Amino acid sequence: MAATLEIPEESGESSVWRGFAWSLRRDLKLAIRCKAELGVQLLFYVIVVTLFPLAVGAEPLVLRTLGPGVLWVAALLASLLSLSRIFAVDFADGSLEQLALSPKPLPALISGKIAAHWMSTGFPLVAASPLLGAQFGLPADEGWLLALGLLIGTPTLSLLGAIGAALTLGLRAGGGLLALLILPLYVPILIFGAGSIEAARAGLGASAQLSLLTAALLATLVGAPLAAAAAVRIALD
Amino acid sequence: MSSIAWFRLASPASFFPLARRLVPWFSAGAAVLAAAGLWLGLLVAPADAQQGDAYRIIFIHVPAAWMSMFIYVVMAFWCAVSLTFNTRLAAMLAQALAPTGAMFTVLALVTGAMWGKPAWGTYWAWDARMTSELILLFLYFGYMALRNAIDDPRRADRASAVLALIGAINVPIIYFSVKWWNTLHQGASVSLTSAPTMAATMLSGMLIMAFAAWFYAIAVALLRVQAIIVEREKNFRWSGELLRWIR
């Protein structure tokens, strides 16, 4: 039995979870060792959000109306900005190929990478959103609702985005192409996410939108790693 | 026996002559149907009681909108075939369909705007149908842009097939999300859903135009797929022979 490789006899299920945990740990470690890059994602989000009052004026009513939408659009853009990081470095130095060759199931390894990506880039946005919401004059309960919506919605963005990131691996067109591929797919998430606050304001309650966001999360949780794994294999061919 | 013939046609080399033979038939069919449909629509059908003659743009608008969605479904179907059976021709057909689908989407959007001005008093309202049609256009552009960005045609086939399939799953989700968003906004005070019952001549004119658009799409896709086959298979000897034959 080779010392460095995992044993093939272990059952399929534990192989999935071990692959997931291993790749999650690895990518989190890489993310933590590059703290400056993490800060850049969050700062991008904060700066984009800050630009809006400067552009539309500081009228409290306007800001309160625009606030949820602005925060959601900025979250989409911040997610888009960080997407290429999921695979690009591993693709450039060849470790993505090693991952694809490993006996662990590739979708599990990619799920770990996506989870690490969300924890390092998505979660900080969620944590900062109530504060930024307050800047837009959102009351506390709307701020928490916003954070809850982003908490459910941003993992979906990472999952969908991973497919786009894998499809565009190593292409010259780069970032603009990724935006063209992925932003249309983000539309339902944006609508449900920003709509949750609007529904709450209209007195309808946000549970319908939050349920739809959760449904989207569960569906992409199952499908997106498989599609991303297929896309990675296509890119490595 | 028939199954053997079908699989034989999956080879670009044997499909090329068939496509070449079919194009004139579908072109002629499209021309005849379009002439009949336009004659019915523009001359025979009565003017609408409320909209006068402005409504006559539906003879272009509705077929274009139908085709824009239908072509995406057909494209996604060929993408699925190309991924599962790994056939070159299926991917080439999807590639050939995309520009036509995008053209019909643009046509539906533009004619819709032209119709919206006299009917609703605005070129654009964020109605669920318009918004999802616009996003469908972005999906077509994304598909074509991804294809163009990849140099290796086989990788382009498979990557764009994955994208088209994800888009196909998303189209209904996008449509319903926009629809619910729209009802929440109470926004656009205009709705097409409660369209009045249509005179029989209007309906038949519209259906004939839809068939004309369908035949046109088939003819153009078959024409384009010939160009794609010749371009991509240019290193095979039979492809060179085809070129000589065309000249």
Image (tube, coloured by chain):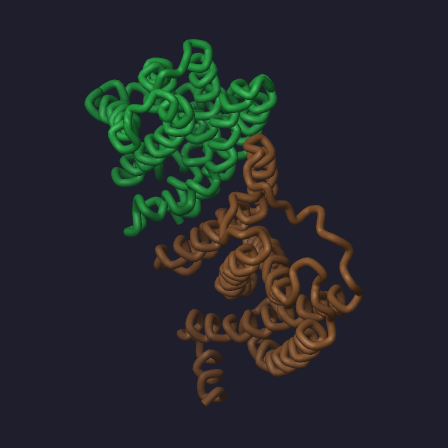
Quadrant where the N terminus of chain A sits is: top left
Which residue is located at x 55 percent, y 32 percent?
B185
**Along the line of sight, which residue is nearer the eye, B158 or A53?**
A53
**Along the line of sight, which residue is nearer the eye, B86 or B209?**
B209
Give x and y (percent) for residue B155. Answer: 42, 54
Up the image or down, B174 lies above or below B40; here it is above
- On the picture, is A219 further left or further right than A31? right
Give x and y (percent) for residue B182. Answer: 57, 36
Quarter location, residue B66: bottom right
Which residue is located at x 43 percent, y 51 percent?
B142
Quarter location, residue A99: top left
Residue ranking furthest to the right:
B200
**Along the line of sight, which residue is nearer the eye, A217 or A204?**
A204
Which residue is located at x 49 percent, y 26 percent?
A193
**In the image, which lettered chain appears green?**
A
Q: How many marks?
A: 0
Give x and y (percent) for residue A229. Answer: 46, 38
**In the image, which lettered chain appears brown?**
B
Which residue is located at x 47 percent, y 27 percent?
A194
Up the image or down, A111 lies above or below B61; here it is above
Up the image or down, A202 lies above or below B128; here it is above
